[in-house]
Image (spheres, helix red, strand yellow):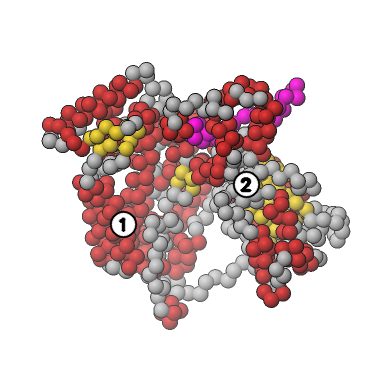
Amino acid sequence: MPTAPKPRQVISLLMLRHNTVVQASELIDELWPELPPPSAVTTLQTYIYKFRKLLLKQGLGNLLQTQPGGYSLTIPPSSLDVSLFERTAEEGQELLQRGDSAAALESFERALALWRGPALADVETGGRLFSYVTRLEELRFRILEQRIEADLETGRHRELISELKSLVLEHPLHEHLHGLLMVALHRSGRRHEALEAYQSLRQKMIDELGLEPGKELARLQQKLLSDHPAEPEERPRPRAAPVPSSRPAPPPVDDRARVPPEPAPLPVRESIGNPAQLPAGLAGFVGRQAALKELEAALRGPDGPGADGTAARIGVVTGPPAIGKSALAVHLAHLLRPRFTDGQLYADLRGSSSEPRDPAEVLRGFLRALEVPTSRIPESPEECGALFRSRTTGRRVLVLLDDVACSAQIRNLLPADPRCALLVTGRRRMTALVEAERVELGPPPREEALEILAALTGRQRVEREPEAALRIVELLGRHPLALRCVGGRLAAGPRLSLTALADRLGATPRILDVARLGELDVRSRYDASYAGLTSSEQGAFRLLSMLGESPFTAAQAADLLNRPAAELEFVLEVLADQHLLGADRCADGVGQYVFDRLTRAYAKERLDETLRAAPVVEEVGAR
């Protein structure tokens, strides 16, 4: 293995992408993320030549092949530790799912024994290798948790205590690890220590995040207070385990004998026909006070029958993909619950997806929630809408419609009574709802963005490295979902410094690779909006990324794209309507457009992909 850093990067990427073609452009991006030197191609070819010589000395020269546009390294998966780890870990997950804890434990131990330190510990990582390292480290940690679960199920609770204590010191805010430690302590006859572990975690979470432990951990604490040991099926599990557990629950008789009754729910109006469908709010919701105040005032309205007009109040929240529209709307809906005592209805219309929900289906669901018998629900959407308005007349009902494609999609979902309210979120402006109070969300202010990062990472870490925290916030364009993804990574890796992460973010050519965590993925949100554009609009969107993050006019865009300004202005308005461009007017009344940071990063990715796919065709001149 070479000692120079860049050849090691080339070999690492080829090995991680074994048996596939790695484009030369990808290798160049990994080696020189900012600005490749003029000699980049020649230098890369030199590294490949030296690597091939090393393989020839071992009699393996045929493993590295030059392919059109790139290179491929042919290696049997069985000869790579990373492939063996993934395969053995998956085998353990399947065994654990089937209830064979002893065999699962053996597989997990074999998988973890393949690790001899951090992933690519002696290799410098650019954007692509960093994403591989992150994925592997997250998988390793999940398998470690599941190995401990299997250990508990085989009765090795006493042996686990010292290991779990060490892990919770490394991950002081990790609820699942604390839950496993509590179970191990309790089963070892050390219930008081298990309860102390809960109180210690609770105090840290309140001090650093302003949050209480989750319901699963609180339920475990109640069981310990009642002196009921947690059975394997009852222990806290990670919320995003790779393989969901399908093991059967304990027999009902044993469950009643061992588990104390659930605490009585909070007093909430639950009378017949009063649905409470709101999804759970986002833990640690931060900021957006001005938008909340404006919408709350509009939707709450004055008291008294007929005091606020003859129509239901409407609030609309729009903005770019993943900017926090749904989180804001759900948070506001929960704040308004005491006002709308006759029910809260909720539906995700999936307007940004390729398969939006049928409004008639949503409407029928609302009628069933309002206890209209199925036999009395009409077939016609218009008749269903009329019945819905009748059922909400004289009542205080809040309707929250999330991810609406356009105002036409909700025509029959509007309650009629002035004491009702409708709250809508969507990526388009929906200017047809002229009577609505409209809020357009953008990236939050710097202080709020830092609060989001601190809420997830820990305030003390942010205060220790304030300049790095600010760099992270600005590099991510103060984008809430991206900040949650990166904050989650930092929370899972308490030894990772903010400065190191900021340096990596600054160096990566594809920042959206980092703006993902499990099912949270900023890029996928942009994919949905991009897919909804015409090919002409997609082409303009890609090319406009060349104008950078500074505001530009339709005339400047027309010069770049070699298209008439009047024709292009229509396309720019479409992009602005979808919140893929910001739009404003300068002092002289001329319209200006601007990319936010992550939207431009996505557009540039798409442009780079197009140029790599058809490097000879000049898209600017193709009309």
Q: Is residue 435 left or right of residue 603?
A: right
Q: Position of residue 492 (x, y in %)?
A: 41, 46
Query: Which residue does the image show at 51% across and 74% down from the upper left?
Result: 261
Choose between 304 and 596: the one closer to the eye: 596
Q: Quadrant of residue 390?
A: bottom right
* Measured Cα–Cα span from mark 1 to mark 2: 37 Å
Choose between 217 and 408: the one closer to the eye: 408
Query: Which residue does the image show at 67% across and 56% down from the upper left?
Result: 400
Query: Which residue does the image show at 59% across and 48% down from the upper left?
Result: 352
Three-letter amino acid code of the residue under disc 2: Lys
Residue identified by numbered label 2 = 325
Q: Residue furthest bottom?
A: 253
Q: Which stretch is magenta? A: 584-607
Residue identified by numbered label 1 = 90
Q: Position of residue 540 (x, y in %)?
A: 58, 31
Choose between 192 and 623: the one closer to the eye: 623
Q: Of marks 1 and 2, which one's residue comes earlier in the chain?
A: 1
